[in-house]
Image (spheres, rainbow, N blue to C red):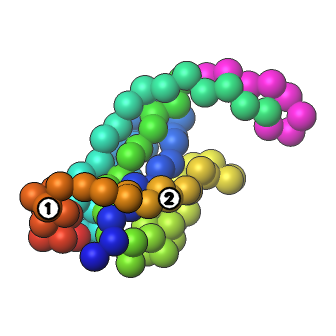
Amino acid sequence: MKAIIVQTTTNNIKEAKKIAKILLEKNLAACIHVSAVDSLYTWNNEFCEEVEYLLNIKTKKENFKKIKRKIKELHSYDVPEIVSFKIDELSKDYEKFIEENC
């Protein structure tokens, strides 16, 4: 099994928790951290600064496409951030946790 972290942001905690809950209920993720972050970016040639909620979704690589589809379905942004990071190393116990919960 190859473990990854999928990352997305939302503009409100309610949406972040809704996405997290659905991904967990569908066994697409083993664990999801939700954190408030200060986001600075440009959108339509305008500078934006706001608080967003970052979801770090721990899962198996094979779930990425399903997670991407589900985020696009549930997300309010026109262009939601959906990126993944491979996990080079992790403990055997945490690997087992991910495997058993996805």
The answer to whether residue 44 is magenta is yes
Percent of width and height locating residue 71:
48, 60
Q: Residue at x 41, y 44 (%)?
A: 55
Q: At numbered mark 2, what does the secondary structure look like: helix, strand or loop?
A: strand
- Give me the C-alpha separation between circle 1 and circle 2: 21 Å
Looking at the image, is mark 1 or mark 2 earlier in the sequence? Answer: 2
Residue receiving disc 2: 84
> What segment is highlighted magenta in the picture?
43-50
Residue 67: give x, y in percent of width and height: 43, 67
Q: Is residue 1 left or right of residue 5?
A: left
- Asked whether the viewer can see residue 49, the reply is yes
Find residue 92 and name its label.
1
Amino acid on which disc 1 is placed: Lys
13 to 93, vertically: above or below:
above
**What residue is shown at x 61% (from left), y 52% (from top)?**
80
Dot 1: within a 10 Å radius of its alpha carbon, few (fewer than 14), some, or many (20 or more) residues? few
Relative to 37, is 60 above or below?
A: below
Q: Nearer the viewer, residue 95 or 79?
A: 95
> Residue 19 placed where, x, y %?
38, 53
Q: Which amino acid type is shown beneath numbered disc 2?
A: Ser
| Residue 18 showing in the rendered view | no
Residue at (61% x, 22% y) in the render: 50
Mark 1 or 2: in front is: 1
